[in-house]
């Protein structure tokens, strides 16, 4: 019996169309637009101005607070302007737009392919380096990684969990990374272990990636303290709290952080980025992005420079299909639908999913028939039907009382609802409104 | 770009469950019961079932179109289920006009007055059935004998149900050991060769339906198992106390509408609680009330009343019985 | 038989008597002293419980009025000056005259003038759409057309115009309570003075983008050209962030600004038709954005689909 989390969950069709496509380097675009806010927290402060020349890997915007992240240029060339560009959030955000000229990297970046196993930096130095390199959670949450590595006083990390679950349908970027960059990934894991001062690390992988499980299990014999845990396929296993529950059996308390149960979770992409930053001196300016969809000609996994337009990626995967209805940044369960494909790839872009017109529209909404399916699939033990009703009534006191803030927005409730009710839409609204109330109460 | 992209909040992926698919799942589960009732009650069963289903659908259509002024959604199958369940809850010699009144009450009062599917607090079919039971007690409590009345309708040979025989007998001071001789064996009752309402006679067929519903994940096990389990345990306790005064627990599960109620009536989505824990409480409540009405009430059968009574408790169960939250912190003081 | 009737009457009568005695004492014991004026004020109020005064309901407002020393800060927009005068009389303090107000929609980006750049397919709720993204047009300030203001209106004074996709205020019904203003997540609706003879002039746009960008996304956007600012002799117009705003306290309703606006972003309401069209001051007829009518249909259908079927 494979491990999994105990409560709720759904089984959307997996559709991992690009699982066998090796990672390809995407050709450099003509221009990139790099938003200064690609992470959770305060936007970075730009350090360059119009007409400045930049090199690949150069710091162009500086972290502006404890929860914030550095931004590096992903190309070499000239800054044309700093302007607002629509990003995947659908709003215009300040971005640094650079015209590409050649590809000249900073000299201190080690571009050789050799594996560097020895870890020379101390724990503190690693955390500092991770912060300097602008690394954020690459699973999509984009939470600055150095914050997660700095264990608060009085708490102790016991176990590092590397998230290779990739429970979102369609996406394969983490899967390919585990197959092609396994050694780098494992060294990255060791670096993270050293930073956190833990002796045990577990890589959680869902059972539909048998090749990755086998490959990593074989390799982990050479790396002390790291083991691989195969997990039963169930969405949303990639959720931090669900993964901790699946692997350790511990439940992160409501409103608490994973460190409260001694666990720290990092994505496989993050572990790889940490390897590159610490061992190769390479800041985070490129990432693996899956471009996929049923009518996409060539579903692929690309290594993409941050700031490249989504349109370029789609072009490289065979162009925008005729029957396109929706273009999603991320997976089908938690991704964001884009309003235009002239949107830059950011640190949090794990995939571009193109859905055909026929699958893009929601069904007609009917009255709730109280089938209780939303209650039974909710991985957080909430009652989505109730949260939607009380939010609709603007009874936010009750919404808070029913623990709306525990919702992880996995979308299982909306997925399962036979009446096509926009449950998560309203729950999210409830979270925003209750969040406002909580903030005013604290202030 | 020639075409506009569609933008909506996540998720962008939807499951295959629809109201229609769930309702049709229930209808499929009802087929074995339907066939058994046709086999044992023949023409009468056919007339009652067809009348009930057609009038339920027509009433739903007319009421939603002309009174509620919404687009009728009769294709979702819920009216068919209500009609079918109502037919399953009446004897096969019930006159057509009474069946039509039952369907009108079930759909009109039981369901549409509250705003249609999803808003009714009580199981519509049971509202119709109980209305008929109190309004037409004679017609509703004369049951045609199985098999021999296949070709008759209103003039069918009638008899009492096992539960009725037992109730009457015990009231007259007879012993259980004598009464058992007057009623069919548990096995005969299980396959449906017994007098009673159309759909409640065939335990075996209903169990087939239950397996289908569980397999298709239309319902969960909580309500049927907790309800039947409670009936078994509570009636079993009384049976152990005095086997000459109380019937055995297996009889209580097989006889009458316990199985039909547990599988098809109590599990009605709209009128049952939302959480597994709440569903267990709901099932236990129905089971307990059923046994109490059967043993100590004026009516020989109590499943319908028990379900309706517990339906009334559903809002309060939903209010107080919450699922176990993930990572719930137990507050100390 | 007679016995039963007599006994019943006696029993029920006795129970009634006992209950009455208990109630009498309880009512005495727990009597709450309350200013009788509160009831009177509440009676004078319109009982709409709309919240336009800033209090949850009319009763709360009445309590506040009775407690207050002056009525400067208290005003019932629904009842208007007449009701406030009555209230003031009851309490015995001076009433403060206020101008009646009405809601105006500061967006004219109909399907015709503001082409859709994507189709929204989420829940039909403006706040949900706003939390998700900037909207289904290039203009990130404009009306989303999902009708949250219409739902919020207590007086049925608003409806969605199917043709334009914008809300419309029914002037005779609007009480200026401000429910719609609070409901709108884009802050498009504003309460303005009703004005003399119900005449009003306002800028029907809140787009703060640079002129070119604003114009590209919506042909009736305010482009911040300052023509109206220069034309105005009463300092009523201010330009901030490429957006003109007319102060209704200063505006004298001369209509000069309306005539010079190159994008027709300034609206005049309830004025008699102009005698002659000043062709020289006004730019060529509005350039309509070329538009595929199918898209409008799709967008409309989409919105209808989003409404809950009930």
Image: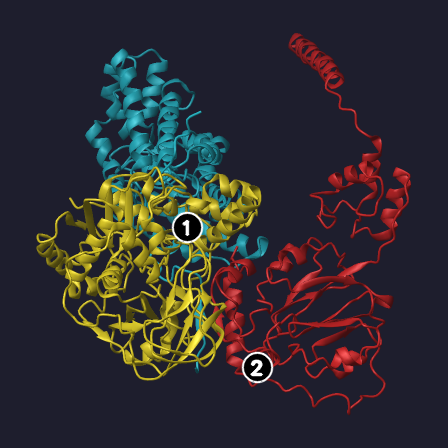
Q: Looking at the picture, how far across and down is residue C132, in whole percent?
A: 48, 62
Asked if residue C195 lies left or right of residue A57, the reply is right
Given residues C309 and B24, the one toward you in this image is C309
Q: Looking at the picture, how far across and down is residue C143, in whole percent?
A: 60, 68
Q: Which chain does the residue under circle 1 lie in? A: B
Given residues C181 and A85, the one toward you in this image is A85
Asked if residue C114 lies left or right of residue B138, the reply is right
- Quadrant location of residue A355? bottom left
Q: Are marks 1 and 2 on the same chain?
A: no
Q: Which chain does the residue under circle 2 lie in? A: C
Residue that lies at the very extreme toward the bottom in this rendered image: C280
**Which chain: cyan?**
B
- Per the image, the residue denoted by label 1 is B78
Which colouring convention does the figure follow? by chain
**Is residue B178 among what the camera can see?**
yes
Q: Looking at the picture, how far across and down is residue C107, in whole percent?
A: 65, 70
**Which chain: red?**
C
**Which chain: yellow?**
A
Asked if residue A168 lies left or right of residue C262, the reply is left
Given residues A152 and B188, the one toward you in this image is A152
What secondary structure is found at the residue carrying circle 2?
A: helix
Q: Looking at the picture, how far across and down is residue A193, in whole percent?
A: 22, 49
Q: Image height check: is C237 above or below B290?
A: below
Q: Image height check: is A297 above or below B63?
A: below
Q: Image height check: is C256 above or below A269?
A: below
Question: Quarter holding the N terminus of chain A?
Answer: top left
- Per the image, the residue denoted by label 2 is C216
Q: Residues within 10 Å of mark 2 (few under 14, many from 20)?
A: some
Q: Residues within 10 Å of mark 1 (few under 14, many from 20)?
A: many
Given residues A417 and A306, the one toward you in this image is A306
């Amino acid at each position: 019996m494979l491990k999994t989390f105990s409560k709720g969950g759904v089984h959307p069709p997996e559709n991992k169309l690009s699982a066998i496509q090796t990672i390809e380097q995407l050709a450099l675009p003509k221009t990139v637009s790099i938003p200064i806010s690609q992470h959770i927290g305060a936007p970075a402060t730009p350090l360059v101005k119009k007409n400045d020349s930049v090199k690949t890997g150069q710091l162009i915007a500086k972290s502006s607070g404890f929860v914030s992240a550095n931004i590096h240029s992903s190309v070499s060339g000239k800054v044309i302007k700093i302007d607002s560009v629509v990003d995947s959030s659908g709003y215009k955000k300040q971005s640094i737009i650079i015209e590409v000229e050649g590809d000249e990297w900073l000299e201190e970046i080690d571009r050789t392919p050799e594996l560097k196993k020895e870890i020379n930096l101390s724990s503190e130095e690693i955390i500092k380096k991770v912060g300097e390199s602008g690394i954020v959670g690459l699973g999509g949450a984009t939470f600055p990684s150095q914050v997660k590595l700095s264990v608060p006083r009085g708490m102790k990390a016991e176990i590092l969990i590397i998230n290779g679950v990739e429970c979102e349908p369609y996406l394969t970027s983490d899967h390919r990374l585990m197959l092609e960059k396994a050694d780098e990934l494992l060294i990255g894991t060791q670096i993270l272990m050293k930073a956190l001062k833990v002796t045990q690390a577990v890589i959680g992988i869902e059972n539909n990636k048998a090749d990755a499980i086998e490959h990593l299990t074989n390799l982990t014999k050479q790396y002390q303290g790291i083991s691989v845990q195969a997990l039963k396929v169930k969405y949303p296993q990639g959720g931090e709290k669900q993964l901790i529950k699946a692997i350790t059996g511990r439940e992160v308390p409501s409103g608490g952080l994973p460190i409260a149960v001694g666990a720290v979770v990092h994505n496989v992409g993050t572990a790889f980025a940490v390897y590159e930053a610490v061992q190769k001196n390479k800041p985070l300016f490129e990432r693996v992005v899956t471009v996929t969809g049923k009518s996409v000609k060539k579903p692929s996994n690309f290594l993409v420079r941050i700031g490249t337009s989504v349109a370029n990626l789609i072009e490289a995967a065979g162009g925008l299909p005729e029957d396109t209805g929706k273009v999603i940044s991320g997976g089908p369960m938690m991704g964001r639908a884009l309003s235009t494909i002239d949107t830059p790839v950011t640190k949090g872009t794990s995939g571009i999913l193109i859905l055909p017109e026929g699958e893009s529209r929601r069904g007609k909404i009917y009255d709730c028939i109280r089938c209780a399916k939303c209650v039974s699939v909710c991985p957080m033990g909430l009652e989505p039907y109730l949260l939607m009703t009380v939010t609709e009534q603007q009874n936010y006191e009750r919404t808070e009382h029913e623990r709306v803030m525990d919702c992880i927005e996995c979308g299982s409730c909306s997925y399962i609802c036979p009446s096509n009710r926009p449950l998560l839409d309203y729950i999210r609204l409830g979270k925003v409104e209750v969040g406002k109330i909580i903030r005013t109460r604290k202030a | 770009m020639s075409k506009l992209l569609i933008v909506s909040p996540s998720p962008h992926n939807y499951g295959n469950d629809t109201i229609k698919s769930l309702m049709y799942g229930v209808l499929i589960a009802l087929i074995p019961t339907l066939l058994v009732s046709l086999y044992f009650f023949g023409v009468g069963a056919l007339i009652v079932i067809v009348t009930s289903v057609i009038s339920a659908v027509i009433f739903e259509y007319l009421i939603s179109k002309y009174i509620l002024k919404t687009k009728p959604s009769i294709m979702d199958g819920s009216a068919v289920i209500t009609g079918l369940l109502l037919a399953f809850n009446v004897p096969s010699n019930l006159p057509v006009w009474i069946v039509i009144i039952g369907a009108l009450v079930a759909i009109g009062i039981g369901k549409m007055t509250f705003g249609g599917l999803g808003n009714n607090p009580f199981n519509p079919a049971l509202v119709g059935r109980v209305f008929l039971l109190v309004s037409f007690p004679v017609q509703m409590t004369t049951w045609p004998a199985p098999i021999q009345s296949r070709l008759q309708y209103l003039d069918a040979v009638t008899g009492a149900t096992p539960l009725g025989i037992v109730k009457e007998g015990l009231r007259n001071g007879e012993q259980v050991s004598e009464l058992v001789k007057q009623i069919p064996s548990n096995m005969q009752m299980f396959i449906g060769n017994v007098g009673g309402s159309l759909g409640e006679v065939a335990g075996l067929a209903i169990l087939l339906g239950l397996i289908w519903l569980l397999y298709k994940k239309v319902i969960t096990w909580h309500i049927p198992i907790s309800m039947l389990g409670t009936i078994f345990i509570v009636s079993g306790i009384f049976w152990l106390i005095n086997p000459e005064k109380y019937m055995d627990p297996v009889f209580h599960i097989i006889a009458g509408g316990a199985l039909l109620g547990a599988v098809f009536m109590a599990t009605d989505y709209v009128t049952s609680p939302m959480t597994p824990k709440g569903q267990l409480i709901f099932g236990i409540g129905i089971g307990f009330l059923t046994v109490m009405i059967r043993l100590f009430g004026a009516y020989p059968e109590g499943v319908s009343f028990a379900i309706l009574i517990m339906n009334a408790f559903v809002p309060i169960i939903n209010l107080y019985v919450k699922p176990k939250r993930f990572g719930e912190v137990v507050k100390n003081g | 038989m007679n016995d039963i009737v007599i006994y019943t009457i006696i029993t029920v009568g006795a129970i009634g008597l006992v209950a009455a005695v208990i109630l009498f004492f309880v009512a005495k014991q727990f009597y709450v002293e309350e200013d009788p004026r509160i009831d009177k004020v509440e009676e004078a109020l319109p009982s709409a419980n709309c919240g336009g005064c800033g209090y949850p309901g009319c009763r709360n407002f009445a309590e506040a009025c009775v407690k207050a020393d002056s009525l400067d800060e208290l005003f019932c927009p629904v009842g208007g000056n007449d009701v406030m005068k009555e209230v003031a009389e009851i309490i015995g303090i001076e009433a403060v005259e206020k101008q009646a107000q009405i809601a105006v929609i500061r967006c004219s980006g109909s399907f015709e003038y503001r082409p859709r750049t994507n189709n929204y397919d989420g829940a039909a709720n403006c706040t949900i759409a706003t939390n998700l993204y900037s909207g289904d047009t290039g203009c990130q300030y404009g009306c989303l057309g999902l009708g949250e203001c219409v739902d919020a209106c207590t007086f049925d004074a608003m409806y969605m115009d199917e043709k334009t996709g914008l809300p419309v205020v029914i002037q005779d019904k609007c009480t200026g309570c401000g429910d719609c203003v609070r409901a709108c997540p884009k802050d498009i609706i504003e309460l303005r003075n009703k004005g003399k003879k119900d005449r009003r002039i306002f800028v029907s746009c809140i787009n703060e983008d640079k002129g070119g960008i604003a114009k590209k996304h919506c042909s009736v956007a305010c482009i911040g050209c300052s023509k109206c600012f220069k034309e105005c002799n009463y300092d009523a117009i201010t330009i901030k962030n490429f957006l003109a705003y007319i102060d209704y306290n200063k505006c004298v309703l001369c209509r000069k600004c309306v005539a010079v606006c190159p994008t027709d972003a300034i609206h005049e309401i309830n004025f008699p038709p102009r005698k002659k069209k000043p062709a020289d001051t006004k730019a060529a007829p509005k350039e309509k954005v070329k538009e595929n009518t199918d898209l409008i249909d799709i967008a409309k259908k989409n919105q209808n689909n989003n409404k809950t079927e009930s």
